[in-house]
Image (tube, grey):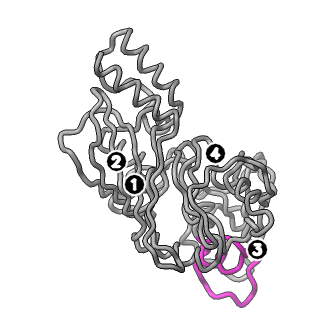
Amino acid sequence: MEERLQDNDVLFEKLRVEVDAGQTPIRIDKYLAEHVADVSRNRIQTAIDAGNVYVGEKIIKANYKVKPFDVIRILMDYEPQDYSITPENIPLNIVYEDDEVLVVNKPAGMVVHPGHGNFSGTLLHALAYHFQNSLDMNDPSIGLVHRIDKDTSGLLLVAKTPLAKSLLGKQFFDHSVERTYNALVWGRFDEPQGTIHKALTRNPKDRTLYTIAKEDDTTAKDAITHWRVLENLLYVTLIECKLETGRTHQIRVHMQSIGHPLFNDEKYGGKQLLKGVRTPEYKQFVERCFDLCPRQVLHAKTLGFTHPTTHERMFFDSNWADDIQQLITAWRTYCHE
């Protein structure tokens, strides 16, 4: 059924593009990527998937081909915001820095990029303050090379020059960057290690979430996670995950798909008592654990890459955030009581 703008819809126009008379048919995502400055095709596709892109009064899909005189609009249900990055004096845990790269250990609860509902207090605002006399975080040719979720702690890589961002980005594309995460998941495993190779796509019921894609899903993105057991803790397991691909929510969705949601991951089924005896004492213990680490238990622990100019292979390791350390200690104590 065709979706159209209704008279009672209150939407704000964020972008308007009028297609000229001589335009040949071309996919709309490609057309917008070529005609709108500083917006990637991936961001355009995200807007299309979310139902925010219109031609006339009609919501269109990514395979729509633009025609001469089309009026393309991006409409949002909130007023346009100023996303420019201004310096904010926010403490940073810098692990390493030279003239080309910076490695930072991000705390849980900090958003990486500004976006709807998060217009300040992000990692980019903190970096803008750190670099305020040398670099402009509004320049898309420098900055963060990858991302992690707001409530995931751990290592992130920042490029300080366009060359560094280009060369480091290629390493991520080629899967030559080594990244491992530590996660606490529900349940115990029958095997000491394994690999999950399942493509991901947006959840059609909630576009902010992801799910395992069906075989015929043309929007699916390949995703591979290697996991191994680090420590059995009765009803939960501490694991290491090594990524070949870096899809949004990849570890969280993959572990949920094999019946081991991340502990306290509310969005993917981990914020409930899934394993163990349902005694009042145990229920109280689990609730206390949820309070100790009030987020999904996921930490970007290691990061390995080739330096863009020296070509030296670099490797960084980070300690768990305090909330994860306290949680693991609580489970270890419970196991030995």
- C-alpha distance separating marks 4 and 1: 20 Å
Q: Which residue is mark 3?
A: 17
Q: CA distance from mark 2 to mark 1?
A: 7 Å
Q: Quadrant of the C terminus?
A: top left
Residue holding disc 1: 180
Type of the residue with mark 3: Val
Residue 62 quadrant: bottom right
Please tell me whether residue 316 is drawn above or below residue 263 in the rendered image. Answer: below
Residue that mark 2 sits on: 240
The residue beneath circle 4 is 110
| Residue 23 visible here | yes
| First of labels 3, 4 by sequence position | 3
Q: Nearer the viewer, residue 127 or 288?
A: 127
* SS assignment at label 4: loop
Residue shown at the point (44%, 50%) measured from the top left: 301
Can you see residue 220? Answer: no
N-term mark: 4 or 1: 4
Residue type at mark 1: give it: Thr
Q: What residue lies at 40% left-to-right and 42% top-to-bottom? A: 183
Mark 1 surroundings: few (<14), some (14-19) or many (≥20) residues within 10 A: many
Q: Is residue 290 left or right of residue 29?
A: left
Three-letter amino acid code at the position of disc 2: Glu
